[in-house]
Each structure stands twice: as structure tokens, then as C-alpha cells.
Image: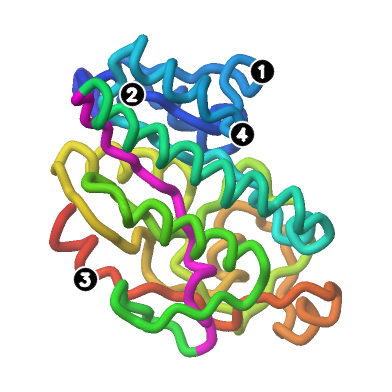
Amino acid sequence: MIVGAYLKNNILLLGGTGTLGKTIIKSNLFKNLYHPSRRVLNILDKSKIENFLIKNKINIIIHCAALARVKECEKNKKKAYKTNILGTKNVASSVANCFKKKNLNVKLVFMSSDGVYPSIKGNYKESDKLKPYNYYGWTKLEGEKIVKKLNDFIIIRTRFFDKNNIKFKYAATNIFTSSIEVNKLSLYIYKIIKKKFKGIINVGGKKVSDYKKYKKYKKNIKPCDKTFIFNSTNVKLASDASLNLKKFNRLI
């Protein structure tokens, strides 16, 4: 945490009950942070979003509200579509309307995923061809397309985990990602916004196998081959989703 450092904008956090949302709230990096419950502000209700933005003079939205569990997205594609695509469309539309009606400029920070890349060869740059390998990744890519129509946006492609909540017993020695611990991601979001960055950026850590990464936090986790992981589910998973972080490293 950066002690005494705050973003003084009025910031709306969407998805405050999720792992990343809770971490952002606890970080205390964002001074004027609104994080209404889904009951108070549902992203499927466009009029409520627009009214909230205007009433509270919001300058920045951190949009991490999503159906993010890959298996659930595959099982309930309708729900994933509504939340991840229609919800994002409502948020982006509200941002655009605020500028048209009230000349209120709102930067939208959209939390995307490394799942928009094919995730086969690794070292993916922001400019590389996008080809999601499962339904969750596809919904995130469609969300990106919506957000990119705005004048002021940040799209963060990433993967994260909670070191205190690693539930699985096995991790592959030959599945690679640039996944980072959620507390670090929260800090990086803060830094990227503070730098007044605009555009698309990969955010993560160095390429490492799932086993090596999780072994650091869960000593009794067992190593396995990726075929064991792939055969344990009917959902397509990444082999190498590692990210090229040159833009991120230059910025941070």
C-alpha cells in the first residue's frame, strides 16, 4: 500500500462484492470511492447507473462486475451474456450519455482478461490477434469492443488469484500464465489510473507455471501434468497465457 497516497476523484466501483472489488475497497488507495451493492445499483438497470453518475459527479468507474467463473459461464451462457456484455453495454452507454447531457467526463476502467488471447504460445502483446478459447473470454472480448467506442477508457487484460484462497489440490507444472496476487493488481490499477493512461494494457507478473506460483502460498499443493487438469473438466483452459508486459513495465 502507498501510505497517504489517494486518487481524489469521485470513483464508482462496480463489482465490490467480488475478490478484486473487496481488495480495492480494503486497499484505502481510493479516497472518494463509492461501492453500492447490486441491490442499490444493478448494471442491468441503465437508468440507475446514469442517475448515480450524475448525482455523485463520478469521474472514474472501475468496472470489475462480471460473471467470472469459467465453468458457470459455460453452463449458463445466457446469464454470462447479460452480465458481462449487456451489463457492460449499459455502463458504457451511461458514460456516453453523461457527457452528452451534462458534459460530465467519466473514465471507464474495464477489467478484461488474458482469456481474450488464444493462450497457446504465450508472450501475448496488446496488438496480437485475439481469439478467446472459452465463452468467458468471448464475453470479455465483446465487452472490450463496447468500451473501445468511448473517448476515455482503460482496458486491463489480466489474471489474478487470492493467495489466501487456493482451494485446488493439484497444479500443473506445464501450464503458464502471468497471473498476479490480487493485492498487487489493486495497487497496479491505482498506479495506472494515476498515470492518466488511456488504452489497452496487459497487467501481470513474470511467466511462471501454475505449480511454482501456487506452491509459494500452499505448501501441500501437488504437481501434475496439464493433461490431468484438462481431463478433469469439459471447459477449455489455457496452456500458455503468459503476457508481454513491456508496455506495463514502461508505464509503472
The residue segment tinted magenta is 103-120
> What's the CA distance linking mark 3 and mark 2?
28 Å
The mark closer to the camera, 1 or 3, is: 1
Say which amino acid is labelled 1: Arg
Residue at 37%, 20% (x, y): give it.
53
Which residue does the image show at 54% across and 69% down from the upper left?
A: 115
Query: How far apart are the alpha carbons under marks 4 and 3?
Result: 36 Å
Could you tell whether 27 is left or right of 245 in the image? Answer: right
Q: Which of the labelled discs sits on residue 39, or is there none?
A: 1
Q: Which residue is mark 3?
A: 246
**Residue 119 drawn in magenta:** yes
Q: Earlier in the sequence, mark 4 or mark 3?
A: 4
Q: Amino acid at mark 2?
A: Ile
Picture layout, residue 183 above or below residue 131: above
Ranked by sequence position, the earlier of labels 1 and 4 is 1
Q: Nearer the viewer, residue 27 or 40?
A: 40
Which numbered disc flags the more N-terminal residue, 1 or 3?
Answer: 1
Q: CA distance from mark 1 to mark 3?
A: 40 Å
Coordinates of residue 121 in the picture (x, y in percent): 47, 89
The image quarter in which residue 123 lies = bottom left
Residue 83 appears in the rendering: yes
The kind of residue on which mark 3 rests is Lys
Secondary structure state at the residue bearing disc 1: loop
Q: Nearest the camera: 212 or 75? A: 75
Q: Nearer the viewer, mark 4 or mark 3?
A: 4
